Amino acid sequence: MTGTLTVVRPGALTTVQDTGRRGHAHLGVPRSGALDAPALVLANRLLGNAPDAAALETTLTGCALRPDRTLTVVVGGAPCPVTVDGRAAAWGTPVRVPAGAVLDVGAVTAGVRSYVAVRGGIAVTPVLGSRSADLLSGLGPDPLRTGDVLPIGTAAPRPPLADLAPWPAPPAELTLPLRLGPRADWFTAAALRTLTSATYRVSQHSNRIGLRTEGPPLERLPGGELPSEGMVLGAVQVPPDGRPVVFLHDHPTTGGYPVVGVVAEPALAAAAQAAAGTPVRFVPG
């Protein structure tokens, strides 16, 4: 450990995330990890960290932190104002924060989730090989609270690969490539046409477990209920109300509602930044 960060303001929901804990689904443990993984990896790259170094994922309202020694940070992902002791600082590029100063990551101006990466990474204790907070299972560190103290790891002895990089804009419309199955045959032909032709919207009830949608319900064929079966990242499950839910990184590893299709993982980073009300289209792919 080379220093600490004290939480001055935790924001609506701020968690520690890395690239997740893979390979434990058979134990009922989701992958978890940063919902916008490319943003996490880019922030780490700008600092010379390993790609999977842990950082903070904020939700909508940002957070505020005070280091006990001078450090370098990058705030990326969803664009937002950044200040150091009340003075404007850069977003999306390395920023020096003196010891005792307050780094304030403000509310997003677009998108949903910002990432606060620190040179050396957030060095909380790993659980099952990952430092990520899993909101469904409760593994990993709790969401940040005022007064929490976070350890900072030792910076790698290598320079950053870049000091400036382009950041993708949050989506004005979310287009999700969908591969039908494994339970598409539980739905009417009209429902499948609706799924790939209608425009849905992101529900305000979306979270790290799943992106919920609002729009025309999908009609199921008459029949019984499914026994619980395995769920994968990107599965599009259809609960009794008929509105599709896209499973994100904290999704359950099993479920009993039919999965009409699966969204390819590379498209999920944009889903992580789609604010409530964003139009959503499912396209064959």
Image: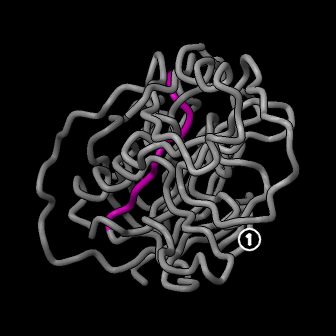
**Kind of element beneath mark 1:** loop
Q: Residue 5: percent from the left, percent from the top? A: 53, 65
Position of 284 relative to 211 (above/below): above
The residue positioned 53% from the left and 49% from the top of the image is 234
Q: Residue 266: percent from the left, percent from the top? A: 36, 45
Position of 160 with respect to 228 (left or right) is: left
Q: Quadrant of the N terminus?
A: bottom left
Residue 281, visible in the rendered structure: yes
Q: Residue 65: percent from the left, percent from the top? A: 56, 54
Q: Quadrant of the C terminus?
A: top left
Residue 64, visible in the rendered structure: no
Find residue 98 and report its image quarter: bottom left
For residue 48: magenta? no
Q: Give whichever of 260, 202 is nearer the camera.
A: 260
Find residue 156 and report its image quarter: bottom left
Amino acid type assigned to the residue bearing label 1 in the image: Ser
Position of 29 relative to 84 (above/below): below
Q: Give whichever of 126, 272 is nearer the camera.
A: 272
Residue range in magenta is 110-119
For residue 114: magenta? yes
- The crowding category of the residue bearing disc 1, from other C-alpha atoms within 10 Å (few below 14, some 14 to 19, many at least 20), is some
Look at mark 1 in the image and give the residue it sits on. Answer: 137
Q: Residue 34: percent from the left, percent from the top? A: 49, 56
The residue positioned 74% from the left and 71% from the top of the image is 138
The residue positioned 49% from the left and 79% from the top of the image is 23
Q: Give whichever of 194, 67 is nearer the camera.
A: 194
